[in-house]
Amino acid sequence: MSSSVSLGEALKFWAKLGFISFGGPAGQIAVLHQELVEKRRWISERRFLHALNYCMVLPGPEAQQLVTYIGWLMHRSWGGILAGTLFVLPSLLILIGLSWVYLTYGQVPWIAAIFFGIKPAVTAIVLHAAVRIGKRTIHNQALQWIALGSFLAIFILNLSFPIIVLLAAAIGYWGGKRYPEYFQQSGHNNKAVKSSGKAIIDDDTPTPAHAQFHYQKTLVHSAIAFACWLLPMSILIAIFDWKTLFPNLAWFFTKAAFLTFGGAYAVLPYVYQGAVDQFHWLSANQMIDGLALGETTPGPLIMVVAFVGYLAGHIQHLIGNSSPFWFGALGAVVATWFTFLPSFFFILVGGPLVESTHGKMSFTAPLTAITAAVVGVIVNLGLFFAYHVFLPHGLGGAISWISMLICGLAAIALFKFQKGVMTVLGGSALAGLLIHFSAILIH
């Protein structure tokens, strides 16, 4: 594609974006829209929404995939790979540092106080996400029943997240054929931008040759992507053995990457089930703390996987090793690599393929049903967090009324006053500190 934006100029923007992309997928997509459609005119409104629709029906973090997609459209495969990497890299480095601080100094009273304030806010943020996604995607009674069924399946039957996804997809496929009116995808609610001159990738700009579907290219790219998965996996198995931590991390997060329909909040229950219940890499409270750190750093929220990977590596190598930091850092890198590799595969290999199937009911109806099921799963996650925050010592212990109050205030700030995640987390952290220092003064 003839482009007046050089690769170097584009990379400067993608690197800057990696450091300023706070606010979760909705906030990140809004920043991208403002910068690329309204301000820089790199891409037209229609082409931007077209790309966004592709990314929203794929598993994986849609904001990161959208960055990869636009980078790919403008500057071929390397443009996409570098754009997507720069969107994630700052977040990975920051989270490795914060995870080390958390494990090394987490028991310092004032840091513990900050987390005491943040945890109830995270509970409110998760429930707010469920409502927000629900409003956007559940637009009829059939989808409401799917959401309710998925909530009951995970809450009462403790059904695993992959099974819920498969059941929802099967219902969507059947429903799309029998009752298509219930499984139509709702349009994206972005207001059209008043045109301020032609965009570099405009409505009538033809699809570049590299973005068109070719069997041979698809096979080559698929082979390269598989090699990028197999080589590091083989090295980890050769060094550490198959049944040890790092190959387990790689395999677990490979599976997680294919289940992230609906964004990070959707995959968190799966990560929790595996990391906390199955492998015992970290505790339930550490998982909540990790989500809090993920919310306060730039980049996609799914980067909480780096925190899980770091804690797994650091804690398992705490005894008998002089430097558990490096094992933690390796855990974070492994978790991030295997979580994001499929995202690049979906765009660089699947982009042209998805383009050819986009809008076909047999393809979109299962995804609509999965998104509805995800809402039920996120509500369950919010209730799980609420249980651990409000009843820190279990059902027989005392209720933390202060945590309930902070959660209530955070919910009011989110639902009524539409405050941003960073504002709510900052206020909650401050509340935790005030409670801590008030207790010291009283005693």
Image: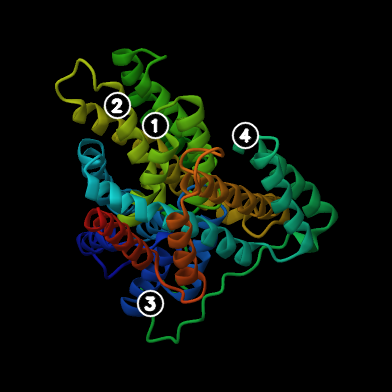
User: Looking at the image, is 3 positioned above or below residue 223?
Assistant: below
Residue placed most toward the observer, 5 or 214: 5
Q: Quadrant of residue 137?
A: bottom right
Residue carrying label 4 = 160
| Upstream in sequence: badge 3 or badge 1 | 3
Distance between mark 4 and mark 1 Cα atoms:
19 Å
Q: Kindly state the secondary structure of the residue where label 2 is placed.
A: helix
| Upstream in sequence: badge 4 or badge 2 | 4
Residue furthest to the left in view is 322
In this rendering, would 403 be left or right of 380?
A: left
Residue carrying label 1 = 282
Q: Kindly state the secondary structure of the residue where label 3 is placed.
A: loop
Looking at the rendered image, the disc whose residue lies closer to the viewer, 3 or 4, is: 4
Looking at the rendered image, the disc whose residue lies closer to the viewer, 3 or 1, is: 1
User: Looking at the image, is 32 positioned above or below residue 325?
Assistant: below
Q: Position of residue 196 (x, y in %)?
A: 38, 87
Q: Amino acid at mark 3?
A: Ala
Q: Does the image show residue 62?
A: no
In this rendering, would 285 be left or right of 332?
A: right
Residue carrying label 2 = 315
Asked if marks 1 and 2 touch (Cβ < 8 Å), the reply is yes
Q: Amino acid at mark 1?
A: Leu
Looking at the rendered image, the disc whose residue lies closer to the viewer, 2 or 3, is: 2
| Upstream in sequence: badge 4 or badge 1 | 4
> Callout 2: few (<14), some (14-19), or many (20+) C-alpha neighbours within 10 Å?
some
Q: Residue visible at 33% across and 48% down?
A: 81
Q: Amino acid at mark 4?
A: Ser
Distance between mark 1 and mark 2 Cα atoms:
8 Å
How many numbered dots are placed on residues in this image?
4
Q: Position of residue 2 (x, y in %)?
A: 33, 66
| Numbered badge on residue 199 | 3
